[in-house]
Image (cartoon, helix red, strand yellow):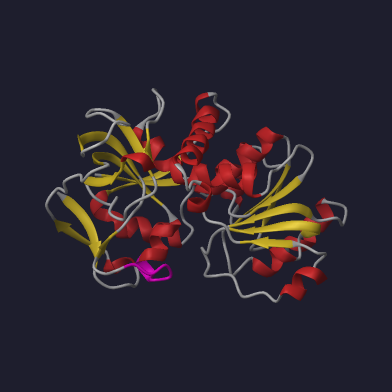
Amino acid sequence: MLAIRFEQTGGPEVLKTVDVPVPEPGPGQILVRHQAVGVNFIDTYHRTGLYPVKLPSGLGMEAAGVVEKVGAGVTRFAVGDPVVYSSGPLGAYAEYNVTSAERAVKPPAGIDAKVAAAVLLKGMTAEFLVRRCFPLKAGQTALVHAAAGGVGQILVQWAKHIGATVIATVGSQAKAEVARRLGADHVILYGEQDVPTEVRTITGGRGVEVAYDSVGAATFEGTLASLARRGMFVSYGNASGPAPAVEPLRLQRAGSVFLTRPTLFDYTATQAELDDSAGALFDLITKGIIKVEVGQTFPLAQAADAHRALESRATVGATVLIP
C-alpha cells in the first residue's frame, strides 16, 4: 500500500512516499480502508519534533473509510461498516491503517467520508472547548483566533448556536468574509489591527469571558490583554510556535484570569466521552447547524504540499488527503 513516512524531523520535505505491507488488525483492532485522510496541525507538530515521536514513523491520526477486517474480540464494528477515527495510532497518511475499535466511531448515514475525515478531530475539539473546557453560555462573548481555519470555523458556528457573541480574528479580507458568513459578530484583521484594542472597543472596555487561541506564540500577549476580569484563556494550539511560559502573578495582574492548555485526548479519555463528543458534533452537522467546509484536497502522495499550505496559512477550512 502507499504510505507517507518520515525518518527525521524537519520541514515538509522530510515526508516520503513509500510502499509498505498492509497491516493486520490485532485483538480489539480494525483495519480501515481509507477513503479520506484528515490533515491537522498536530501532524506538523509530530513532523517537526515539537511533539516527539519514535522515528522512523508514519504520520496522521484521522481518517474515514470502510472497515476491511476486524481483529479478535471486536463487536463494535463489522466488515463493511463506515468508520472514522481521530485517535491514531500514527499512520493515517496511508491507504490502510489499523486503529482501536473502541476509539473509532460510526458516522451517521449521509455523512460523506471527506466530511467525516475533515471534521472529527476538529469538531470534537470545538465540542470540548465550548461545552466542557469553558461551558460557553448565551450572552457571553468569545474571542476566536484563526476563525477561518478548520477548528475556528466550527467554533464560530457552535458558539453562535449557543447564543454567544463572537469576535473572530483572521489574516485576510477573504478570511474575514468567511468568518462573517459563519456568523461572527465582529471580525479583527490581526495583521492590520491591534487585537486587544479592538476587543476593548467592541466590549466597552470589559474584555471577553473566554478566548480560544490556537495560534500560540504570535497571539499570546494580545489574547492575555483581551480578557475580562476572571476571564478564561484557552490555549489549545501552537500554529505560530509554542506559547511562552507564564508567571502566575501575571494572571493576577491581568484580572485574576485563568489559563488552561487542554488537549482533546483528555476530554475523550473514555469510550463514553468519545461517543458523547462525536454524537454531539454529528447531531449539529446532520441538523445543518454546523456546516463543514473542505477547503482543500490533495492526493495522498502530495502530503508535503498539504503541510506547506497549512503552515503558510494559505488554507481555508479543512484540508483532506485522498488515497
Residue drawn where x is 39% and y is 23% of the image: 110
Residue at the front extreme of this rendering: 73
Residue 215 at what x, y percent from top left? 57, 62
Would residue 188 be visible to someone looking at this image? Answer: yes
Residue drawn where x is 25% and y is 28% of the image: 78
Label total for image: 0
Left or right, 40 with reference to 299: right
Question: Is 137 covered by the magenta stretch?
Answer: no
Q: Which of 217 and 63 is in front in this view?
A: 63
Residue 309, placed above or below residue 142: below
Residue 19 at what x, y percent from top left? 13, 55
**In which quadrant is the C terminus drawn?**
top left
Would residue 193 be visible to someone looking at this image? Answer: no
Residue drawn where x is 28% and y is 73% of the image: 8
Secondary structure mostly seen in magenta is loop
Residue 15 at what x, y percent from top left? 27, 64
Left or right, 209 with reference to 21: right
Residue 76, placed above or below residue 237: above
Residue 7 at what x, y percent from top left? 24, 70
Q: Nearer the viewer, residue 305 or 159?
A: 159
Residue 29 falls in image quadrant? top left
Residue at the right extreme of this rendering: 204
What segment carries the magenta color? 47-53
